[in-house]
Amino acid sequence: MYRGFWYAQALDLDNDLAPALQDSIQADVCIVGGGFLGLWSAIRLKQAHPEKTIVIVERDRCGSGASGRNGGVATNWWGKYLSVRTICGDVEARRICEAAESAIDEIGSFCQQHGIDAQYRKDGWLWTATNQRQMNAWRVLTDGLQRLDVNPFQELDRQTIRGRVGSPLVLGGIFDPNAATVQPAMLARGLRRVALKLGVQIFEKSPFTHLERGKHPVVHTAKGHVKANHVVLALNAWGAQFPELRRMIAIMSSDMVATAPVKAKLDAIGFSGGECMTDSRTVLNYWRNTPDGRVVFGKPLGQFAFAGRIGNLYEKPSPAADKVAAELRRLYPQLQDVPVVSSWTGPIDRAMKGLPNFGYLDQHQTVSYGIGFSGNGVATTVFASRIIKSLATHANDEWANCGLVDQKMKLLPPEPFRFFGAHLVRDALVRKESLEDHDQDAGFITRQLVGMAPAGYVPAQKK
């Protein structure tokens, strides 16, 4: 397996490997997938029910999928508030966003309590505009939050935000103090260690092959199987192999690069804090630095998975690395000579509204799932695991009845229309947003295609 920067760094510190599943075993709950959602869910279930047998089966190593390949950006959901309210109303949307906000601090306190060095820095999120067309893209959101008296964002003038970002292209922006950055693979490895210590049974190098459904579902792996009272599908993009989930998401990649350490240069231009940063594009530029002075920069420019077939599509350096690096250097001309030392890519389970959905797979209610995190799973999985815990134990509580459970989701088109349509829309967005850098308008066809794009951080009136 190809290892990107984060995961290679994490394995240098902890390369423990759990045994593969090679027998027939029984469990109260079997979780398929050892990423953030699976690990947080296993920990919550074991803490609440220490007498229960909780099992995780993972195709590779825990955290080696999307959980160890993202930007390490933990943001809350106030930026998604307008999308959340469309599915569950103001009251429930506010409760969900408050839970998402508390997840930021929970990551920090959990790491401190369990001695996890995940390079956690709660320095906030800078949402920027890097051309004139992006200015005030956040206004419809902040105005809506202001009416509810819950607006966490602080508007910054050009001089202030440019001084904190360090890019001459930044024209303005807003700041949310309730966000953090982490080394995501080290966080995942730390969660794995805690889960094992609690008594969760983890089987790695145990790829899931198929599921027998029924009153007592059976999870089959390459060399063994688990008969369980309940199964949790915590598969991220790999969940698309199930027909019920396939049209909830489009599988796309986000592509990332990491530079060599250049801490002195970052300090000199003001890019010295631990904030996570984005611009206001739909094909989002997102970036942050690391404690040792690297820049990690990402943009979703890569490949789509046809019909949910992932295979080894993302097990390689990013095919879009040159384009991502060029975007980094466009924003930071001061870093033109800084070498890129690693690139990688990973799958995103992109939902139309950018929000995850949860529920039971069929009428037996013995298989639950969470899918559609849309590239925002670092903090979201913390409170999402509360939903999974309640569904797995059939609790009739605020989480099992959460507004994110059993959404009436807008389904994506079937294949091949989804695959080709995703390329057309993504390329139209890139074209439109590149023209906006030069204060130019896109043509009619491009604008029509852009209107089909899913929701992002920039609220769209049509949604």
Image (cartoon, rainbow, N blue to C red):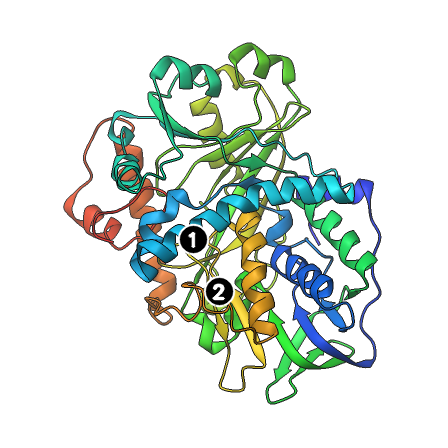
Residue 301 % position (x, y): 44, 45
Q: Is residue 42 above or below residue 254?
A: below
Residue at image location 65% in from the left, 35% down from the top:
120
* Amino acid residing under circle 1: Arg
Q: Can residue 114 be seen in this view?
A: yes
Element type at marker 2?
Answer: loop
| Furthest residue toward bottom | 215
Q: In this view, does 107 lie to the left or right of 95?
A: right
Residue at image location 59% in from the left, 21% down from the top:
338
Of the numbered discs in the image, which one, if any, rests on residue 109?
none
Residue 271 % position (x, y): 53, 19
- Alpha carbon separation for disc pair 1 and 2: 10 Å
Looking at the rendering, which quadrant does residue 340 occupy? top right
Residue 405 % position (x, y): 44, 68
Q: Can residue 71 be seen in this view?
A: no
* Amino acid residing under circle 2: Glu
Element type at marker 1?
Answer: helix
Provide the residue designation for mark 1. Answer: 95
Q: In this view, does 45 lie above or below 299?
A: below
Quadrant for the N terminus in the image? bottom right
Provide the residue designation for mark 2. Answer: 398
Q: Is residue 434 above or below residue 212?
A: above
Q: Which of 430 and 87 is in front in this view?
A: 87
Who comes first in sequence, dot 1 or dot 2? 1
Quadrant for the C terminus in the image? bottom left
Q: Nearer the viewer, residue 146 or 86?
A: 146
Q: Do the residues labelled 1 and 2 touch (CB within 8 Å)?
A: yes
Q: In this view, does 401 lie above or below 94?
A: below
| Furthest residue toward left | 444
Q: Nearer the viewer, residue 40 or 459?
A: 40
